[in-house]
Image (spheres, grey):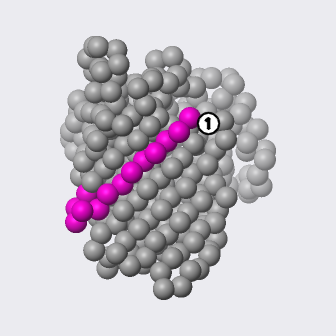
Amino acid sequence: MKKNIFLVGCGNIGSRHLQALVKLPFKVDIHIVEKSNKSKILAKNRLKQIKFNKKNFNFFWYNSVDQLTDTSDLVIISTLSQGRADLIISLLKNKNKKFLIEKPVCQSKQEYVNLLSQMNLFNATGWINTNRRYFESYQKIKNDLCNCKFININVVSTASGLGTNAIHFLDLFSWLINDSKIKLNGKFLNPKLFSNKRGREFKEFYGTILGSGKNNSSITLNFLPSKDESTFLTISTDSLTYVIDELNQNALKIDKFDKKFNFNYQHVSESTTKIVKDILEKNKSLLPQLDESFFNHIELFRIFNSHIKKQLKRDITLCPIT
């Protein structure tokens, strides 16, 4: 079979999606929308870094979605969150039906509600790329936890900030406990508003977020500003504990016997291949759909906007995360 895929946004993350697409086991026309020459060069250089069957893939480059005249089998959205909801709606109106969307999906509850409404109107489906659900190591852990009474997760990370990464771990928690409505507390956020490398209009957050789910399950996210990247998790239940060092890819299972095992961290350039293959061949994915991720998004908007209001003494409409 031959598929038609739109990749909208081909910067750092988008170029990793591109690396994943050329690992697909069937022929694909890849239509790439990216106006930045710097990003185009990055993407083309990253393609040169990997081996793939060039006969199976055709690449078409555009500066704007307005130049897309065809419809796709799948649209991958890896632009900044600012204006992303309107971008997706414009693609819906051009009869595109399936979307893989980077996170956060947008910057406000109002944008998210409108996007959900438009998705329903056009009978389309959007999956959110919180890709830890596709890590084989987390899949094995989820199987181990299926009969546990509660789950407590603690994350300590210096890999970027909460605005960028909190949604990943909230989704992991939601998936492990089968609860999409996690209640958050942001009163322990660092009072300082940090700059974001993606632009002046965006902010980053550090400190601690507390979350609670069903059956007294809980999550604690501790993000600290540091030049050295690290991410450690403990996942505890009534009968066992996992200690995970994501970046060094090792873990320890503690129950009656302590057992070390290799933790396989899967980058976007790996996980997207499996995700896209599932969507195109099975019309389903392990990823959450838009409605499943709604509550976690609006809770993050709520606590971040409240934190900004407290620091700047003014109301915030659009949450400045990307």
**Residue that sits furthest to the bottom in the current view:** 256
Q: Secondary structure at mark 1?
A: loop
Kind of residue at disc 1: Ser
Q: Residue at label 1?
A: 226
Residue 35 colored in magenta in the image: no
x%, y% of residue 233? 50, 58
Q: Is any atom of residue 22 visible in this view?
A: yes
Query: Viewed as shown, does residue 267 lie left or right of 103?
Result: right
Residue 224 colored in magenta in the image: yes
Mark 1, Cα crowd under 10 Å, few <14 / some 14-19 / many 20+, is few
Vertical comparison of 94 with 47: above or below: above
Instruction: Name the residue located 24 percent from the left edge and 48 percent from the top edge.
Output: 183
x%, y% of residue 104? 40, 38
* Magenta region: 213-225
- Given residues 110 and 277, the one toward you in this image is 110
Number of numbered labels in the structure image: 1
- Given residues 274 and 224, the one toward you in this image is 224
Query: Viewed as shown, does residue 231 lie left or right of 90?
Result: right
Instruction: Name the residue located 67 percent from the left edge and 58 percent from the top edge.
Output: 248
- Given residues 122 and 288, the one toward you in this image is 288
Instruction: Name the residue located 56 percent from the left edge and 35 percent from the top edge.
Output: 225
Instruction: Name the residue located 73 percent from the left edge and 44 percent from the top edge.
Output: 47
